Image (tube, helix red, strand yellow):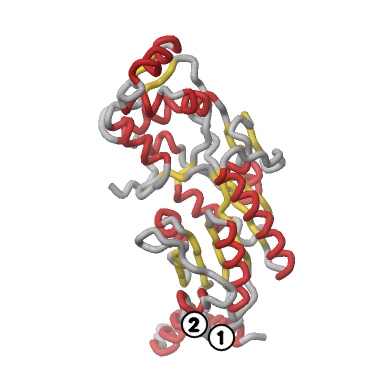
Amino acid sequence: IGFHRKLFFTKWWIDALLETRRRNGVELRFWGKFSKFVTDMCKPKIIVATSSRFIADIMREEWMDSDFFHIPLRGESGEDTEISIDSGIIESFLPSVGDIKDEEIRVILHADKLEQAVAFFHSLASLPSPLSSLTLISTEEVYSPDAGEDVDENFPLRPASSAGNIAVAIEKEARLWAEASSTPLIILRTATPFGSGMEGWPVTLFHQVLAGRYLHVRGIAGRLSTVMGCDLAHASRLTATLPGIYNVADGVGPTWLKLAEAMSANAGAQKRMITLPAQWADIAWKFLKPLPAVRDSLSPEVREHRSMSRNLSSRKLREATGMTFYNTLEVLARTDRNYPYKD
């Protein structure tokens, strides 16, 4: 067996000896320190490659009991990290991993560019040990934006955005690489995650709500999927030994109006959003489109998007792991007493 496994079994016998001596009132400080050293040596290595600081932060917090390594796929100034088979990406970012063999190494990849993802898969060949698992953070955008309710993992992949098309292609490449390398593969198709430090359209919507620029059109009742970032990170841990494809969403499926109202409560007292009849919205768009509130909420594209529903079902994940989710609306509105708010 490998060196680290031998070390682990040695630790097990020492722990048993320590427990016996403690019962007899004897403390063996040296062996206690050695036991802690072995525990630290046997920690799994978690490698997270992502261009998102938010994803990196939530994963770091979830896996804090492991040796955590972050490979930024995008630099501070926005440029992509160059990755090729010969770029030495693993050696450059993970110098302390390079000489370690026979380790539990798990990789979590969150990429938004196909070429970069493919190059990263090839670069994993430089790791000193076979991967214990590869987790790909994918997106709900692989499904049609009007997929409807109870969208499970068997729904056809019909992306309508460039991000969705790229995600489908990356999933395909991940399967090919995992099969060729005999690596257990987990794909998490997640709703857009919320939380402190969140990125993307939730931030834009939040600023619109705070500025009083969110306008709702009566009759629009499209439902969307939501999930807290900490739940996405926790799902990555619970599925680490369960290869397969899993949707990740809290199942609440709020309307855009409900989401906006929860965001208003986050900033203070919950406010009712301005609601316009459809004909008034048409008139406002025709004559007042230069106004930010009209431009952001009443364009034909925005109204069509908010009319469609894509509500993911995470039944498979719940049944496989027993996972429970925070209610994103309650967290945003600051009414969930169990959520660990940071600010």
Q: Residue at x 51, y 68 (%)?
A: 47
- Give coordinates of residue 82: x percent, y percent: 49, 68
| Along the line of sight, the residue nearer the viewer: 87 or 59 | 87
Cβ atoms under marks 2 and 1 closer than 8 Å: yes
Which one is earlier in the sequence, the residue at label 2 or at label 1? Answer: 1
Q: Residues within 10 Å of mark 1 (few under 14, many from 20)?
A: some
Tell me if residue 18 comes above or below residue 78 in the rendering.
below
Label 2: state its secondary structure. helix
Q: Which mark is residue 7?
A: 1
Q: Mark 1: which amino acid?
A: Leu
Q: Cα distance, mark 2 to mark 1?
A: 7 Å
Residue 293 visible at all? yes
Of 212 and 161, nearer the camera is: 161
Mark 1 secondary-structure assignment: helix
Q: Residues within 10 Å of mark 2 (few under 14, many from 20)?
A: some
Figure check: 70 above or below 341: below
Residue drawn at point x = 52 percent, y = 72 percent: 45
In the image, is 4 to the left or to the right of 268? right
